Image (tube, rainbow, N blue to C red):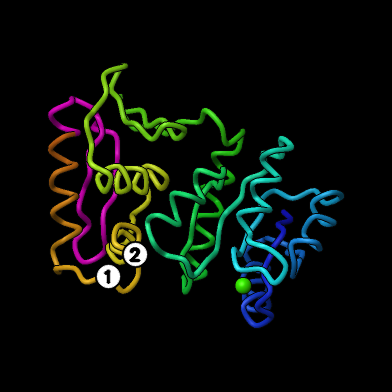
């Protein structure tokens, strides 16, 4: 499977290319938005890995153009911009997922596989677990048409878990995702949100359950 890596950091590009090869991914490298456009025009890519800080333009502008011309190939953003605001902007521009640097290659690989599994257009998509549906376009969770009222962070957490449904989301990843990098937070901050979200999913009879994997993180699974 071929992916296009759009990244101007030569060391990172080399490391990713080397790490993805044994996992079955051939990587083409574009170092600028301009180069990327040339590759996108002719290349048959299963997914695009997109750095936002490119020398000639903001990666989001490139993503915006892609989606604007109806290019629905999956895009995974790789960036140092870890704030929730930056993530939401990326996802709003039609990114399929978002990884904050530095990240583990295993995490990238898992997200890449998840993105490929969900292939089929970025608009109007939804994620499901049990009777729970999460509408990615309007970022609302519902059970058989009935909306579950969630706070911004509960929504972020639910989306993160659903994007990796059936896989454990490490607690550190959840922390980074909810609070950004370098944010001050209590050691149980994520647990508090998990607890609230779990209760809301139960109260709504969603048929989806968040399990705690001790010492590792959290996983959302359909109730048997
Ligand atoms: Ca860069």
Q: Taking 8 as reference, is 146 left or right?
A: left
- From the top left corner, tell me how far across and down residue 186 is, in percent: 14, 68
| Mark number, residue 146 | none
* Residue that carries the numbered disc 1 in the rendered image: 183
Q: CA distance from mark 1 to mark 2?
A: 6 Å
The secondary element bearing badge 1 is classed as loop
Q: Are marks 1 and 2 in contact (CB under 8 Å)?
A: yes
Residue at (19, 49) in percent of width and height: 194
> How far from the left and from the top, in percent, is residue 160?
36, 49
Q: Which residues are magenta?
A: 201-224
Q: Residue furthest top?
A: 145
- Quarter holding ligand 1: bottom right
Which label was assigned to residue 180? 2
Say few, some or many: other residues with alpha carbon within 10 Å of mark 1 (under 14 / 14 to 19 / 20 or more). Answer: few
Asked if residue 69 is among those painted magenta in the image, a careful observer would answer no
Q: Quadrant of residue 189?
A: bottom left
Q: Secondary structure at mark 2?
A: loop
Q: Looking at the picture, does residue 216 appear above or below residue 149?
A: below
The residue under the point 66% across, 54% down is 48
Of 25 and 100, nearer the camera is 100
Report crowding for label 2: few under 14, some 14 to 19, many 20 or more residues within 10 A (C-alpha): some
The x, y position of residue 182, in whole percent, is 31, 74
Vertical relation: 160 (above or below) 216:
above
Q: Quadrant of the C terminus?
A: top left
């Amino acid at each position: 499977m071929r992916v296009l890596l759009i990244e101007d950091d030569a060391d990172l590009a080399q490391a990713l290319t080397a790490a993805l090869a044994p996992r079955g991914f051939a990587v083409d490298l574009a170092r600028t938005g301009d180069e990327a456009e040339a590759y996108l025009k002719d290349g048959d890519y299963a997914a695009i890995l997109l750095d936002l800080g490119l020398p000639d333009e903001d990666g989001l502008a490139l993503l915006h153009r892609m989606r604007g011309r109806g290019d629905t190939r999956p895009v995974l953003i790789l960036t140092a911009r870890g704030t929730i605001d930056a993530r939401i902007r990326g996802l709003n521009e039609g990114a399929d997922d978002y990884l904050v640097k530095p990240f583990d290659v295993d995490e990238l690989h898992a997200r890449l596989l998840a993105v490929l599994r969900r292939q089929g257009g970025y608009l109007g998509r939804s994620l499901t677990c049990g009777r729970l549906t999460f509408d990615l376009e309007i970022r609302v969770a519902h059970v058989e048409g009935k909306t579950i009222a969630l706070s911004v962070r509960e929504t972020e957490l639910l989306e993160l878990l659903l994007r990796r449904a059936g896989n454990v989301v490490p607690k550190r990843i959840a922390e980074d995702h909810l609070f950004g990098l370098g944010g001050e937070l209590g050691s149980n901050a994520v647990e508090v949100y998990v607890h609230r979200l779990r209760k809301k999913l139960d109260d709504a009879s969603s048929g989806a359950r968040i399990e705690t994997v001790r010492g590792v993180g959290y996983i959302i699974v359909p109730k048997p």
